[in-house]
Amino acid sequence: MSKKKKYYTVWKGHKTGVFDSWNDCKVQITNFEGAQYKSFLTFDAAKKALNGNYFDFVGKNKNFKSKLSEAELKKIGQPNYNSIAVDAASSGNPGIMEYRGVDTKTKKQLFIQGPFNEGTNNVGEFLAIVHGLALLKKNNSSKILYTDSRTAISWVKKKNCNTKLQRSEKNKPLFELVDRALLWLKNNNYTTAIVKWETKAWGEIPADFGRK
């Protein structure tokens, strides 16, 4: 089965506009700090989005309807909105990766890093959690932290970024962040609860980049 064609809107990049291939989009966002981009299924949707605000098109759960039973939903309950949510996105594995954290209730972006070359989603999820922990500790916040990655939770608890990704000149800036994150975990205690986001009950995590 062939993949459906996608169009890519770039709000911030070396050049902005609508591009009809991932390779063309990739050129615009590579090595551009704070790049903003997203894929769409039609050119018209991508063009319309270009005239709008990037943050109106990422991390949306408008059409989500859980397939879980009422009993299952009741058992899981609702999200704790006294929290922040973190997530990562990687176009390829490895590929261009970025991560961010948002306020779970308002979706206000609290931090964003990337895009990085030759990253993976798991590494991004790991860095996002540590970044969130450091931010909450700095602010002396009692909020909990949501992530949808069990792998990243395990890495953080073990204080070990157990990635198979090989270091290279292209991903040197990324691994510098990984080393900093590991050093932070080694030298800091934290009381923040790291909680798995219940995607099947609540939809995509609020920090999701909405590019699926």
Image (spheres, helix red, strand yellow):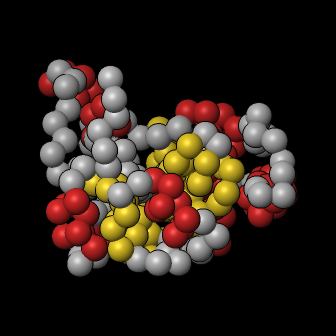
Whole-percent x, y for residue 127 in the image = 65, 54
Whole-percent x, y for residue 96 in the image = 59, 54
Is residue 8 something that shows in the picture? yes
User: Which residue is depicted at the point 66% across and 49% down?
Assistant: 119
Does 59 sit left or right of 25 as displayed? left
Q: Taking 5 as reference, is 24 above or below it?
A: below
Assign the C terminus to one quadrant of the image: top left
User: Which residue is depicted at the point 53% across and 74% down?
Assistant: 34
Quadrant of residue 115 within the rendered picture = bottom right
User: Which residue is depicted at the point 52% across and 48% down?
Assistant: 91
Does 169 sit left or right of 97 as displayed? right
Total number of numbered discs in the rendering: 0
Does 17 sit left or right of 22 as displayed? left
**Front residue of this view, candidates 17 and 34:** 17
Assign the N terminus to one quadrant of the image: top left
Whole-percent x, y for residue 24 in the image = 48, 61
Q: Taking 37 as reference, is 166 above or below it?
A: above
**Front residue of this view, candidates 136 and 171:** 171
Whole-percent x, y for residue 19 in the image = 37, 63
**Front residue of this view, candidates 100 and 1:** 1
Does 18 sit left or right of 115 as displayed? left
User: Which residue is depicted at the point 53% across and 60% down?
Assistant: 26
Is residue 143 something that shows in the picture? no
